[in-house]
Image (cartoon, coloured by chain):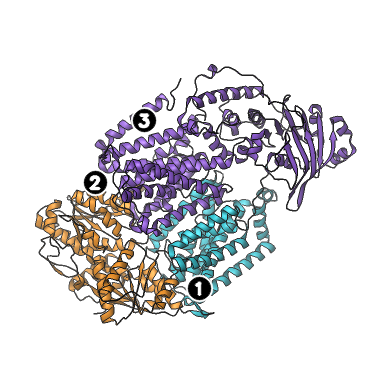
Chain colours: A cyan, B orange, C purple
Amino acid sequence: MFQLVLSGLALGCVYSLVALGYHLTFITSRTLNFAQGSAMMLGAVITLILVVDFNWPTLPATLVSILLLGVFGLALERFAVRPFVRRGSMAWVMSTLAVGIIVENVAQLIFGKSPRGLPNELAQDPVMVGGAGIYPLELLIPVVVLAIAVAARLFYGSTMLGRALRATAFDREASLAVGINVDWMIGLSYAASSMLAAVGGVLIGPLIGVSSHMGFLIGLKAFAVAIVGGLEHPLGILIAALAYGVVENLIGGHFGSSAKEIFGFGLVILVLFLRPAGLFGRTRLRRI
Amino acid sequence: MSEVHPAGIPSASRRTAVKILGAAAASTVLPRGASAADPIKIGLSAAFSGPNATAGEALQRGADLAMEEINAAGGVLGRPLALVIRDNEHKLDRGVAQTREMIEREGCVAMLGSQGSFIGLAVIDTIHELKIPWFALAVGGVGIIENGRKPNYMFRVATNDREVAKFLVSYGQEKVGGKSFAILNEDTGWGVPAIDDLRVALKGRNLEPASVDKMKVGDSEFTPQMLRAKNGGADTILTFSNAVEMANALKAGNKIGYKPKVLSAWGLANPTFPSLAGPLADGVMVMQTFTFVQNTNPKAQALFKRLAEKNRNVKDEMALPFPSYIGNAYDATHMIALAIKKAGSTDGPKMQAALENLGTYGGLIKSYANPFSADRHEALGPEDYSMTVWRGSRLELVA
Amino acid sequence: MRGAIAGRWWLIGITAALVAAWLLPGLVGRYYTQMLALAGIYAIVAQGLNLLAGYAGQTSLGHAGFYAIGAYCGALLATKLGFGFWSALPFSMLLAGVAGVLIAVPSFRLEGPYLAMVTIAFGIIVASILVEWSDVTGGTQGVLNIPRPEIFGTRLPLERQFVLIILILALTTLLMRNLMRSPWGRAFMAVRENPIATEAVGLSTRRVKTIACTLSAALAGLGGHLFAFFQGFISPEAFEFEASIFFLTIVILGGAGTLAGPIVAAPVMVFLPELLQRFIDYRLIIYGTLIVAFLYALPLGIVGSLFRHWGRRPAYAPIGAAAEVATAQPAPSVRANTSGPVLELEGVRMSFGGVRALNGVGFAVEPGTIHALIGPNGAGKTVLLNVIGGYYRPTEGRIRLRRRDITGISPHAVARLGIARTFQTAQLFGEMTVLENVLIGFPGQTVGRLLDSALVTPRLRREEAERVAAARQLLDFVGFRGDLDARANSLPFGHQRLVEIARALAMNPILIAMDEPAAGLNRIAVLLVEHHMDLVMGISNRVTVLDYGEKIAEGAPAEVQANPLVIEAYLGAEDIDVPIAAPISA
């Protein structure tokens, strides 16, 4: 059982990366990037192509992949979100969903239809931790997430850009008034969100295989995690993500694979019923 | 909405675009070497997108190869053969609807079927209503062929799951020396019924499975299943699954220090398996009807050369996934052509009768002598199965 | 007088559709008939989704779940228990409807992405159960050999099934049309346009959402049931997330909130993949690109964009010439006056986290008087109104309406008990017309009227006629002289104000709380919030002054004006005597 908990934590960390992407775009623009799962997939796919087909070493391939996803995020916001924001929520939801479909299928055309392995020495030989076997990569993942969290804290707290982003998240009108280019801020948040997803993809790829459709279910679960944690609360999302990863694995261990979705999403509904703004959210008071 | 320029796209590039599109469209329908005369159409409804797409492609390759040969030799009854394909996305409603559409609208005289036994089962009604022969090329479900219809329009050039199960068990016991077997199949319309086939095969040798588990497609965490197998004392795993699930299972097993022998149905004959499982793929055995690797049959070698010419990224035999499907489709297409010749027409009932009396056909997988008869619609039997094993990134014949 | 349950044009239309459906298969062949029949089924499901997502504004990304419940219920009843198409139908719809209620309950307090999550989760849970519970559902194999629909013992061939589907689609659309032109339709649209205002006019958003969800689910279940019997076999892949997206796309492409939208878009979505067959590899890419292009170029959908030019038919039941109805009193009637104060507040405290907005406020409003509540910005006036209105529950204190304790009851209950209010910014239902905005104010129009709305009974038509006449008079009374069929959000601010007041009057209230000045009203007690003194002094009987959440003065206007505390409070503020921006024009 400890075995399942450990791998669950690693999986949960990947969920948290993707989920934080939802959080980022939501707080700056009150929109959600439903192509987040595809971004994760792209991160893994681009890295694989560079490493396996072009024989790049892993680290540069990863960095290039992340950068490319940043560009993807900018383009996504500019062309699939911004034109639709003023038209109401259904429009950008469908639009980002459609982009996800397009991206997934373009990837399939280029990458092929079969899942392929992303080799990584950290995913070859397990080490023993407390009696359970775990791949070093699974241990690395939480470290990476922690590092990102710390870096984000510093960034938001100490840099001008970080402060500007926070300002936009807090009050759009006021930010506009003090000369912050809100459109750019939102674009950046989409870029950051896609890059986070890419990191998640690169980390999980060696463990589960890379395919053009790997993004769908993980993207959805990450969304659930973001909602349950409270879209505006990164710490809540982190906790929710870890919990979800572990619980999912434990349920899968005892009741079989499909039960994971049933219980997992069932829990999500229950949580939202009891706490409509997520576990850690607070219901916004509306100004009437 | 912006105004569209009245002249549209400049005419030169418009014409080029139309040419390209037209060529693209035509290329999926007419294999090279065919003339423009009224072709005889054979339909293939398979998944060409999503996780099952590789199988569809392999079937298409095999059929295309056969048709090229036949057309180069003048076609059948003076007409070329043409392959009509539809992407059914591995979905039941599409598979059935497309089958009907290809027969009624496109005028296909025979149908090739891909993966998905639920599709195979569901088209039985349509096929017998329209009286068109249907070939199972990638499904092993027994009920599809043994369906109680007379005359029976469902034929199979592929493995039969019941026989595969028996083959795996006997090979496992006799050739590999396995003592205790665990069953680990994928949770699909193929893997689940095959669990029973495996149980029956084990029972036939007075054995009970050490553990029985399913793997959900798309899931990646299979530690619980491997733990149960390990705790059940199994030294061998019997599996009907595809590459990514089994690879993840092996990785999970590796974590808990469990390295059993693995005997698999054709699902693991996918060149991505070694890339997914890494060194853990070594020694995994996969049963097949046909492979290009180490195949001394000159026909096979010639065919492989042609495939390599057509596809630039095919560098060696290993680059072609699911060679069994290529072989199954190739032989089935030739059989259909032979039946038409024998019947002297493309009329369904006549073809059906001709198929049951085909005579000899020197095929790719084997040399067939009357592959079908009135009470046997299975062209292949356990005697035609062979076992291959993964060594590094190559799938080699064992015996 | 136009026809009852269906107007003359509707009867003609339905007959024509049925005739066409009868003849079409002969003309286009079996293959196309099959596709059109599927399109018809999808249109039925999409109509249900249209009700929920288009009219009521609750986006559902899990509708495939209801569709699946209907399909499997019908399929299993038929194959395992020998039910027929008709005998199983009520169960399919009922089960789907119950699922609708179950989903509505956790969704009440949710909006936007949170609501989307619950609907997605529901859809995935249903899809997973279909696969997992294989003993019952057949797992991945699905259910085979479902019998074809029968009429009087004969199994219908494909061509007649098509006619049946078209008939059911026509009836479904008729039902939608009736509902949307009834008080319930207004209620659905109100929830979509402005949930706060919905509560303010006495409609429980919970109740409305639940009904919308239930009806929508039942219709999806109907579609699923049809699908199972039409196709003869079902398996779990037809009910995955992709299906939910498919139905939502139909609604959007056709035009959310239009009747004809789903009917127009369903065939498009069915035939599009067929047209794209040749480009197999590119099919889904083209599909996705088309969706984005459509959303960009035709955001209102095909039908919605057309309607923009022609205008939407207003949402009230067809009636004869308005002149037929006898004119009622020009002034709003007044509820019986009891003695004693209409509204009493005692020790009301309201804190938000650490911020104390109200600190022990108490006063009483006498019947038939105008009581002004003034104070500088930030004094807590709007907060107090919201507490009275039930939007906030006070941390301490009591509120009584005619001696009845109403502290902390929900806003729609407060509204029903007789408190109407207007807001600082006029809270109208933007996409609804002026007349519809006032119509929705009349109390009790949805209670027990669901069936009437669906069937457009004589009772409903009479009540609607009375309401329309009364609404016209109210609008006239408050001085609105514009187009009654204009969309509310196209009005200038002052006109919106008038409409809001007319709506408040329509509620036949005991007390109107107004968060801005209003035209003269002398029979109803008025609690008027204002921070410009001069306006208020001339018209009020009594004035209460708040500052920093506390009452600092009360009395007749002249006294209050002279009170040193009041003067100090205002001198400290920015704009004492600046006249109001927009004068109310008649």
Identify the element where label 3 is drawn: helix
Mark sitting on residue B35: none
Image coordinates of residue C500 in percent, x first then y, are 65, 31
Viewer-proximal residue among A65 and B354? B354
Category of crowding for the residue at label 1, using alpha-carbon neighbours closer than 10 angstroms: few (below 14), some (14–19), many (at least 20): few
Disc 1: host chain: A
Category of crowding for the residue at label 2, using alpha-carbon neighbours closer than 10 angstroms: few (below 14), some (14–19), many (at least 20): some
Q: Nearer the viewer, mark 3 or mark 1?
A: 1
Instruction: Examine the rendering and report whether any part of residue A139 can be seen.
Output: yes
Disc 3: host chain: C
Image coordinates of residue A60 in percent, x first then y, are 51, 71
Is B314 placed above or below A178 here?
A: below
Q: Residue at x 49, y 20 (%)?
A: C320
Could you tell me the amino acid type at mark 1?
A: Met
Q: Residue at x 42, y 27 (%)?
A: C6
The quadrant in which residue C15 appears is top left
Viewer-proximal residue among C547 and C489? C547
Q: CA distance from mark 2 to mark 3?
A: 31 Å
Could you tell me the amino acid type at mark 2?
A: Arg
**In the displayed structure image, the side of residue C333 where residue B227 appears, left or right:** left
Category of crowding for the residue at label 3, using alpha-carbon neighbours closer than 10 angstroms: few (below 14), some (14–19), many (at least 20): some
Image coordinates of residue B30 in percent, x first then y, are 23, 55
> Residue tagged by mark 3?
C14
Q: Residue at x 37, y 54 (%)?
A: C237
Identify the element where label 2 is drawn: loop
> Residue tagged by mark 2?
B105
Could you tell me the amino acid type at mark 3?
A: Ile
Instruction: Examine the rendering and report whether any part of residue B8 can be seen.
Output: no
Residue at mark 2 shares a chain with residue at mark 1 = no
Mark sitting on residue A1: 1
